[in-house]
Image (cartoon, rainbow, N blue to C red):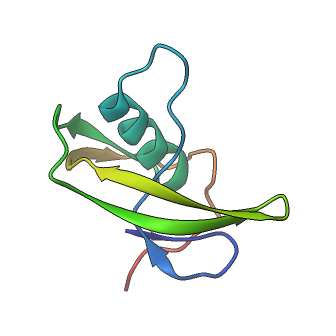
């Protein structure tokens, strides 16, 4: 878990899949970009949830698939370092 950039609430990393990318690989990429963690991601989700996302003057309901990631390394530098906080 990591905090969101805007509200500071604790969230599960989530993001958009790039063209041709598997959903599990997108989850691993987001975990690195948002929290600096690298590891082995499961190929199948362990669950899902829906939430309402606000953006560009509209609200839409999105479904999130949750993929577990076995953390092998925590990098000292990553794209969103300093924009989010760890629990604790």
Q: Position of residue 53 (x, y in %)?
A: 61, 65
Which residue appears at 58% of the width and 71% of the height?
4
Which residue appears at 25% of the width and 38% of the height?
39
In the drawing, does residue 34 fall left or right of residue 59? left
User: Residue reaching furthest top?
Assistant: 20
Q: Position of residue 33 (x, y in %)?
A: 54, 45
User: Residue reaching furthest bottom?
Assistant: 88
The answer to which quarter of the image holds residue 10 is bottom left
Q: Quadrant of the C terminus?
A: bottom left
Q: Is there any visible trace of residue 83 in the rendered image?
A: no
Q: Position of residue 8 (x, y in %)?
A: 60, 81
Which residue appears at 41% of the width and 54% of the height?
63
Q: Is residue 26 above or below residue 77?
A: above
Front residue of 42 and 35: 42
Q: Position of residue 47 (x, y in %)?
A: 19, 56
Which residue appears at 84% of the width and 58% of the height?
56
């Amino acid at each position: 878990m990591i905090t969101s950039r805007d509200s500071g609430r604790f969230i599960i990393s989530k993001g958009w899949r790039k063209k041709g990318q598997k959903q599990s690989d997108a989850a691993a990429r987001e975990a690195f970009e948002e929290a600096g963690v690298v590891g082995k991601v499961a190929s199948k989700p362990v669950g899902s949830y829906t939430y309402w996302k606000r953006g560009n003057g509209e609200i839409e309901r999105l479904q999130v698939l949750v993929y577990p990631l076995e953390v092998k390394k925590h990098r000292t530098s990553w794209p969103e370092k300093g924009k989010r906080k760890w629990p604790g």
